[in-house]
Image: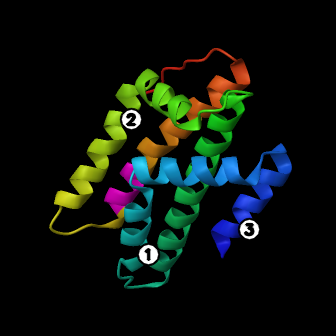
Amino acid sequence: MFSALDIAEAVTENNFDLHDFLEAYYSLGARFELGWVREQIKEHRVLNHWEALARAAFRDDLDQQQRSLTVSILKIKGELNNLEVIIEAWINRHQGLVQRWMQMVQDLKAAVFQDYTMYSVALRELLDLAQCAVLEVETQTGYCKLG
């Protein structure tokens, strides 16, 4: 339900077509395995109040980064029709950041035990990717290099 409200807000604020937003949102989520990461965070056992707060913050951060990436991709899209081509081109331009994120996901999958430190570091990589997307739109450079 939280994602639905977040999606509605992003669509309204940016005057996006809902179908385009959903297509980009879920395509990016699938490509970057954000659903899997979200589920790991959601299912991670909490031992105290602070860990419960951390888990909630990580889920919020993940949702915010997915939204930022989606908004940025749709702003780059403009009048072009093929969203998948645009996403693929954006991923290719940012191979270094995308590869770092995907390596984080693989490391999480390979870990015998996941902890909040791992989520924190992984989400920092996703933040770098999202900040790059936002920077591209704001500066209209079509490229950024972070990290």
Mark earlier in primary sequence (1, 2)? 1
Tell us which disc is closer to us: 1 or 2.
2
Q: Residue at position x 66%, y 72% from top?
A: 2
Main SS, magenta residues = helix
User: Residue under circle 2?
Assistant: 98
The image shows residue 119 at horizontal and vertical percentages of 37, 59
The image shows residue 88 at horizontal and vertical percentages of 46, 31
Measured Cα–Cα span from mark 1 to mark 2: 23 Å
Q: Is residue 88 left or right of residue 115?
A: right
**Helix, strand or loop at mark 3:** helix
Q: Residue at position x 59%, y 50% from top?
A: 23
Mark earlier in primary sequence (2, 3)? 3
For the N terminus, give its image quadrant. Answer: bottom right
Residue farthest toward the top in the current orientation of the protein: 141
Along the line of sight, the residue nearer the viewer: 14 or 112: 14
Mark carried by residue 42: 1
Q: In this view, does 81 lie to the left or right of 106?
A: right
Crowding at mark 1 (Cα within 10 Å: few <14, some 14-19, many 20+): some
Numbered range of the magenta stretch: 117-122
